[in-house]
Amino acid sequence: MDKTILSPSISREPNDRLADRISFLGLEGAFQVLAKAKQLEKQGKEIIHLEIGEPDFKTPNNITKAAIQSLNSGETYYTPSSGFPELKEQIAYYISHTRNAEVSSQEVFVTPGAKMMIFFAIMALVEKGEEVILSDPAYPTYHSLIQLVEGTPVFLTLDENKNFTFDIKELERKITHKTRMLILNSPQNPTGSVLSSEDLERIAFLSKKYDFWVLSDEIYSRIVYDTPYTSYYSIHPPKNRTILIDGFSKTYAMTGWRLGYGIMPNALIEAVTKLANNTHACTCTFVQKAGIEALAGPQEEVEKMTAEFKKRRDCIVQGLNEIPGFHCQNPGGAFYVFPNIQKTGMTSGKLADFLLEKAGVACLSGKAFGAGGEGFLRFSYANSIEKIQKALAQIKNVL
């Protein structure tokens, strides 16, 4: 045996060293606070959960039955990486009719959750050093994934006085020769703001003028309240520079089912197929069958859920505005409120911790969504009105 192979003089780093790229990934604040809240519950403390973006409704029965029937029929095998053909056809039909834009099933890619589609789109399109414009505050996964691929995030400040939308002129000023992508999220997490059709038209014009991609995350598209929803995809932007992302988690109370999809040009479908082949292979078969039923079946439960969310929104906005030091805008969609808490004299992080420990109310620091979120908290009203009213009373009491 060659003894040099076992020589202790060879210097190498410890085996538990992690790849540097892992440091670019953050943790989603909602899950961190949820874990902390669960620990307090184990100690016997009652916690009202307004931190997690998860509908408290059950998945509609017709959807669950479709999955059970699929399992009982033995549909537990692989499907094509891009998705079950029947589901892709149903998604294409749904998007064509809800976005007023002709979509082919060949432009549809099904993923285990919409978050996977966000990852694939950024991975396939953004090179090291290229710029991706996104709002501040924003869903934190966007920032993490941009950093993971060594792209450069460029932030657009959301203006509270403009219902948490951004200035289109500021957007144009931030576009450079390195701009590769703009990420839109309307209705938006964490603020619940909704972009107007006029702003979307101007964004489409800039996309064509400066030749950058638009990733339009429309996961909350069915949860809108006061005005009809306008999708970026319905503005008829250049289809060869647009990725529409949607899914089933929020609309159909299917968060744990993990089912999402993207609509994109065929050239990008080919790249995403390679990524899927080398990661998850395909999306769960019987979950996809449930997705077909969700889109093709009755929609009354969706309408009931949205109507209930509107009642909860009105309740929590009114209640928060009655608490000294709080000022809360009326969101147009999703199920989040983003009150300004600067007059309490506390930072977002300290106040969120204080409310969890002293009031038994779990919420998120606005700073969990970016530097622009300092001075705000995010509450999810995906909980019952009774729990929301109790939470408001407990917050008011401790403040």
Image: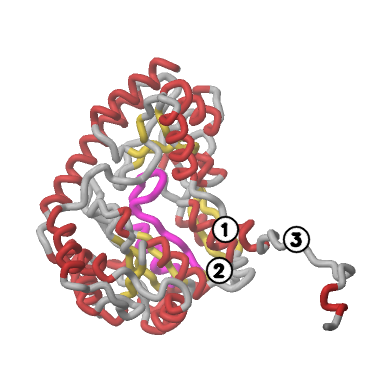
Q: Amino acid at mark 1?
A: Val
Report how far apart the C-alphas of labels 3 and 2 lie in the structure: 39 Å
Q: Amino acid at mark 3?
A: Pro
**Residue nearest the viewer, comparing 334 with 46:** 46
Q: Quadrant of residue 112?
A: bottom left
Disc assigned to residue 14: 3
Please name which of the two marks, 3 or 2, marks the residue nearer to the observer. 3
Which quarter of the figure is the N terminus placed in?
A: bottom right
Left or right of 312, for residue 178: right
Q: Give how far across and how far down residue 250 sits, in percent.
A: 29, 52
Residue identifier under label 1: 154
Q: Residue furthest front?
A: 1
Label 1: how many residues lie within 10 Å, few (<14), some (14-19) or many (20+)? some
Which quarter of the figure is the C terminus placed in?
A: top left
Q: Which residues are magenta?
A: 181-207
Disc assigned to residue 179: 2
Label 3: how many residues lie within 10 Å, few (<14), some (14-19) or many (20+)? few
Q: Amino acid at mark 2?
A: Thr
Q: Quadrant of residue 237?
A: bottom left
